[in-house]
């Protein structure tokens, strides 16, 4: 299956499809937890992606099925900084594979591309957060199976309005 998959770094031209897949991801999460925890606006998301790409603050790799020419998933990253991480490191806020393409090593291909990009950026680590809910145990196992380890804590947020 993976021989028919192309991974490429996204650009501003990819903002609309990236926004579409992000919407799919967020709606899937909200359906799983039965709670509307995200506000998603397609137009706003596309504009934000375009802006982040133009400022070189958001790095995305998109997987495309070469047979259908359709995008089937993506991984996004941004640069973070912390003393505990010895400076710059990468954070993965989103990894999404469209449902019919799951369990076909597409996620592994995207993570491999992300790790190669991290080396190029001289990041010492990549971090990702999965919700500590049973609905996301499969995601946790996926990351652990690809070299990530639990480092403790839970991700918390406070909206600034």
Image (spheres, grey):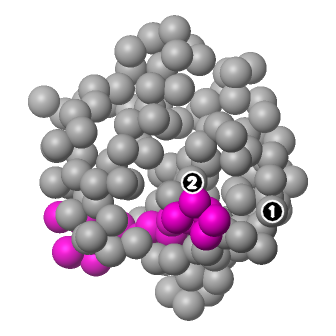
Which residue occupies the foreground of this view, 149 or 103?
A: 103
Q: Name the residue tied to disc 1.
A: 1
Q: Name the residue tied to disc 2.
A: 72
Q: CA distance from mark 1 to mark 2?
A: 13 Å
Residue 148 against residue 26 in the figure, above or below: below
Counting from the top left corner in percent of width and height, residue 91 is at 51, 60
The magenta stretch spans which residues?
Answer: 51-69
Q: Residues within 10 Å of mark 1 (few under 14, many from 20)?
A: few
Report if the CB atoms under discs 1 and 2 are less than 8 Å apart.
Answer: no
Left or right of 140 in this view: 98: left
Residue name at image x 52 percent, y 16 percent: 31
Counting from the top left corner in percent of width and height, residue 5 is at 67, 69
Residue name at image x 33 percent, y 48 percent: 19
Residue 132 against residue 92 in the figure, above or below: above
Left or right of 73 in this view: 42: left
Q: Quadrant of the C terminus?
A: top left
Left or right of 67 in this view: 158: left
Please say whether residue 72 is one of the residues in the magenta stretch.
Answer: no
Circle 2: element type: strand
Give the quarter of the image for residue 27. Answer: top left
Counting from the top left corner in percent of width and height, residue 111 is at 67, 66
């Amino acid at each position: 299956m993976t021989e028919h998959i192309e991974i490429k770094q996204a650009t501003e031209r990819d903002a609309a499809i990236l926004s579409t897949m992000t919407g799919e991801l967020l709606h899937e999460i909200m359906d799983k937890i039965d709670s509307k925890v995200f506000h998603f606006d397609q137009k706003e998301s596309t504009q934000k992606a375009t802006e982040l790409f133009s400022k070189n603050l958001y790095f995305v790799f998109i997987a495309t099925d070469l047979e259908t020419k359709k995008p089937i998933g993506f991984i996004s990253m941004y640069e973070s900084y912390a003393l505990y991480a010895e400076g710059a490191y990468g954070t993965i806020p989103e990894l999404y594979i469209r449902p019919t393409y799951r369990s076909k090593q597409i996620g592994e291909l995207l993570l491999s591309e992300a790790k190669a990009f991290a080396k190029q950026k001289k990041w010492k680590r990549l971090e990702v957060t999965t919700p500590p809910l049973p609905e996301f145990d499969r995601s946790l196992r996926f990351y652990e199976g690809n070299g990530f380890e639990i480092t403790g804590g839970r991700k918390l947020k406070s909206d600034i309005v």
